[in-house]
Image (spheres, rainbow, N blue to C red):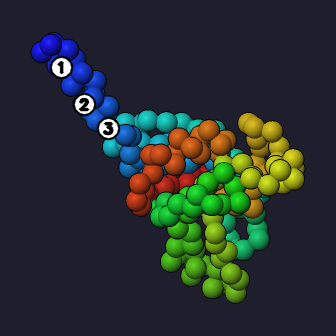
Amino acid sequence: MRVLLAVAAFFVAAPSLAQPVRATRILVDKSEHRMYVFAGTELVATYPAGFGVNRIGHKQEEGDRRTPEGKYVLDSKNANSAFFRSIHISYPNAADRAAARRRGVSPGGAIMVHGQPNDPELAKRVPAYPFPDWTDGCIALSNASMAALWEMVHGPVPIEITP
């Protein structure tokens, strides 16, 4: 009976021993079409990624369909997005706003990491995964990759987007 109780106690306690992976930093390489997710110094995930239609260069203004480059923060999650989940990127930062102000334009905003469109009609117009660059400036992942990233992002997480 004691052995049975000990075995039962192990299986009840075992799931609590596994700690979920929490992202501490994300690196996005636009030229490689890749997102790298780190927990501390350990690389824990790599995902293929798509970007704005005009992939080359840093986002300059609203409507340029470029994905920003630089250091930002993933700062909020939206489970009710028009796409399969979305996580907001803190673009524009102070430097982006100042540069846009000097040019007399809006820097834009609402830049996200997201999955595929929820609207079936819009989904028909998105190239099949793995996809080329198709967003208005966001970072697009497959729905499976977005679901995995969603589980790893808790609270603000730094994201660096490189050319």
Q: Residues within 10 Å of mark 3 (few under 14, many from 20)?
A: few
Say what amino acid the circle numbered 3 marks.
Gln
**Which badge, 3 or 2, comes first in the chain's sequence?**
2
Q: Name the mark on residue 5.
A: 1
Q: Could you tell me if the residues under marks 1 and 2 are in contact, i.e. CB atoms within 8 Å?
A: no
Marks 1 and 2, how far apart at CA: 12 Å
The residue where tag 2 is placed is 13
Percent x, y for residue 149?
Answer: 52, 45
Circle 1: element type: helix
Q: Residues within 10 Å of mark 2 (few under 14, many from 20)?
A: few
Say what amino acid the circle numbered 2 marks.
Ala
Nearest to viewer (mark 1 / mark 2): 1
**In the figure, is residue 57 to the left or right of 26?**
right
Say what amino acid the circle numbered 1 marks.
Leu
Q: Residues within 10 Å of mark 1 (few under 14, many from 20)?
A: few
Q: Nearest the camera: 139 or 142?
A: 142
Q: Name the mark on residue 36.
A: none
The residue where tag 3 is placed is 19
Nearest to viewer (mark 1 / mark 3): 1
Q: Nearest the camera: 136 or 93?
A: 136
Q: Could you tell me if the residues under marks 1 and 3 are in contact, i.e. CB atoms within 8 Å?
A: no
Q: Is residue 41 visible?
A: no
Q: Is residue 23 visible?
A: yes
Marks 3 and 2, how far apart at CA: 12 Å
How many numbered circles does the render carry?
3
Circle 2: element type: helix
**In the figure, is residue 5 to the left or right of 87?**
left
